[in-house]
Amino acid sequence: MSFLRKTAWAAFALAGCLAAQQPDFDKVEMQVQHVQGGVYMITGAGGNTAVQVGNDGVLIVDTQFAPLAQKLMTEIRKLNRGPVLFIVNTHFHPDHVGGNAALAQMIGAARGPGRSDGVAPLKIVAHENVLNRLTQKVVNQPPFPDQGLPVDEYFTPFKDLHINGEAVFLYHEPNAHTDGDSVVLFRGSDVVATGDIFTPGAYPFVDVEHGGSVQGEIAALDHILELTVPSKTQEGGTYVIPGHGRICDEADVVEFRDMVVIIRDRIQNLLKKEMTLDQIKAARPSRDYDTEYVGPNSFVQADQFVEAIYKSLTKKSK
Amino acid sequence: MTRRGGFFASLAAFTIALTPVHAQVDFSGAWAPLFHEDLPERLPGPELGDYMGIPINDAARLRADSYDADRISVVSEYQCRPHGGDYSMRGLSNMRIDAIIDPVTEQLVAWHTRMGFQEMERTIWLDDRPHPGPLAPHTWQGFSTARWDGNMMNVYTTHLKESYMRRNGLPRSDRATFTEHWVRHGNYLTVTTLITDPVFLTEPLVRSQSWVLDPGQRMGRDICEYNQEVPKPRPDYVPSHMPDTNPFLKEVSDWYGLPSPVLRGGAETMYPEYRQKIGKPERPKEKCDRYCNCGALDNPTCSAAPRSPR
Amino acid sequence: MKPLLLILLISGATAALAQSARNAAPVDLTGNWVSIVAEDWRWRMTTPLKGDAASIPYKPEARAVIDAWDPAKDEAAGLQCKAYGAPAVMRIPGRLRVSWQDENTLKIELDQGRQTRLFHFGAKPSQMPAASWQGYSAARWEPPASPQGNGLPVGISPRFSAHSRSLEVSTSGLREGYLRRNGVPYSDKATVTEYYDLFQEPNGDTWFTVTTVVADPVYLFTPFVTTTDFRKEPDGSKFNPAPCSTR
């Protein structure tokens, strides 16, 4: 099977998996938590949304699912009625980009050099690999709506903005959760939004089929630890908005990073003994972490996590 | 007012004055922990592989077996990590308790504790406020509320960060909660702690510890700064033992002449009937030669290295 | 006015005293209990090695006794129960049956060592019984905190000390014995003060913690304080009497 067809099938399968996780959107209630400074976290279904508000307007990180766009916008409008200037996508998965087009439509901003009322146009920003993934044709899947595409993409190691009185950095984390991950640092508010690189209480989904790797995942977590600085007694300070789950800080990221490294090390050790994937799975190298990171509704089961690590470690470089 | 009316008014006032307005005990003051139980474990530190009496499951056992204490220095973020709210009540440093009084009503709103080690601080709320929601950040000390039952204060704590049940790698998850029961008798404070951890425990872990009022103590600062102390062999290095390779897990059985299966812990080891199952040690010993005089007048804080009795 | 108020106070106190200890009990300690051993495990669940006195605040005078422990000698002398005296017996893993022997005597039966402790409320006898392993235990429901330790008011501010739910027991008249099975001694001058505190857990379990304070001017340089935890069991089916053992 050609690489392109393999990728298309993988995307279809992923979309199918994520679709199977979708709840009844009518029953979803949005929860808003103030994180620190001008940054809030809004949860509903799908990935966490980070929202930065201030005198300039609004910056949104990740938009959950399309049917939740109205509920999301309602909550954002309670925080700030200014223009939505940026949507940033941490990666291309549907539970993080699904609301892009609907929100863009609601915002009503014209693409291009400015509206007649003088308000700056909405910019949808992500790493260029996100744009590449979203514009790939997938068999039996409708194309991603143009209005929601992150056409203000970046391809450099990082991008910076200044909005609402603080510097905002987007760092590309290569081949981590996917090949298009961005971590967003709100320098003044001292908050980091990580996307699905960090998912406390659940194994990370290392999306090998879409460029993710355990090596990149660990490097990304290490970078997040470089960005975070705790306050007194090793807690607080820089707060972390994960892809899914509660508001965290550096200490929580450390535990998560250590878990990934230790399980990776164990699988690497088993590979040195020339074990097959089935043998490695049977050895259950993550069994002392499964009770903590796997539940009945978990997206990533233990075997899947082990397999993703195995594939990362055995993937031949091109 | 007539003389009779004056009498009844006074009686009412006296009765009201005598009636306790709240069920409360005064815990405020400077407290020193008493180490008359488990002194070697609580001060020098627990030994690797010692899980005796802890109702752990297999996941906790493997986590602890894999634990490499180098992690505390190599992973620099652990160097200044304080204890969890549950473990800090094992009394690894002195404690000061202050009453937080509402300035308008003069009612007790909370107790505030401060421990000397890593300046751990905790507030125990007595005003029936709700606990934070599931998305709120977790902290080392957690979020604590309490109610009085006569002279006992019953505390409930949630929102804990992942931490440990013992400092030899026995983990305690961030889904754990714990209750405490505080009671003061004269100058002794007894705190009984029960930890419920759906991830690592099969039954609640109960431990009780005593403190004595120590008005002469003065707690200073304990400011910790972390630094890379050990060069890492590679950037993503986290020390741990591969499963079933830790060579140190049976040291305790040799040191104390115990059969090695008892070290593995589990709920059954907490019950009296387990004594019938304790077999013979693989390497019997006649006499103590480790921590024998910990707590004695010539070694009250077990600070001397393990040595034979004189 | 003052004499009338004093009369009211005294009559109230007298009425309280006339109540039996059983009727006045603020908590119910009766029932079947099991000790849960999650602390001091190797010193309680096994016989510790000879010479191991870790955690006990003993004076140098005790060291010679500790090092001279000989279980065979104790057996030969019929002293198998030396480690089952009041200062130590609650630390031995086992089960208890707690009941009222009469309106003013609480009885604790311990299956290990087949020991019985009697907690006497009210005045002490004019002649104290001979020294024994369990000594004589005088009990009271602990009064609220006050400077004199008797719960009576002091000063002019309202008092907020809570009504106590604790049982306080003072034991003296002890034979010399062991704080641990491996011969860490206490003398016949030792006294024991205990506080029994009952509580319930959110899951419905009922527990009590006993804080035991052993003072011994001969062998301890400071009172030896331990806290021991018991959980209530639905019945006494696991109560398993066993004789004292030196090992």
Image (cartoon, rainbow, N blue to C red):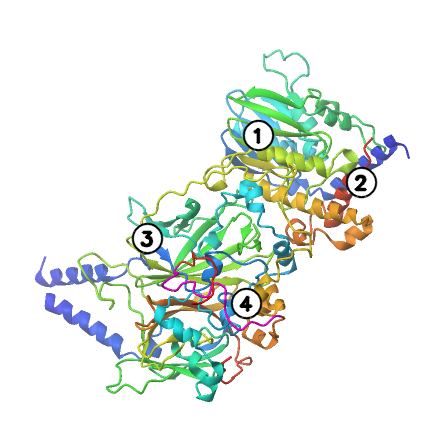
Residue C38 falls inside the magenta stretch: no
Which residue position is annotated with label 1? A51
Chain hosting mark 2: A
Magenta segment range? B283-300
Same-chain status of marks 2 and 4: no
Residue C211 in view (yes/no): yes
Closer mark to the observer between disc 2 and disc 4: 4
Q: In which quarter of the image is the C terminus of chain A?
A: top right
What residue type is disc 2 on?
Thr
Say whether marks 2 and 3 touch (CB < 8 Å).
Answer: no
Residue C71 placement (x, y as % from top left)? 48, 81
Please report whichever mark, 1 or 2, sits nearer to the chain's N-terminal start: 1
What residue type is disc 4 on?
Tyr
Chain hosting mark 1: A
Which residue position is annotated with label 4? B256
Which residue position is annotated with label 2? A314
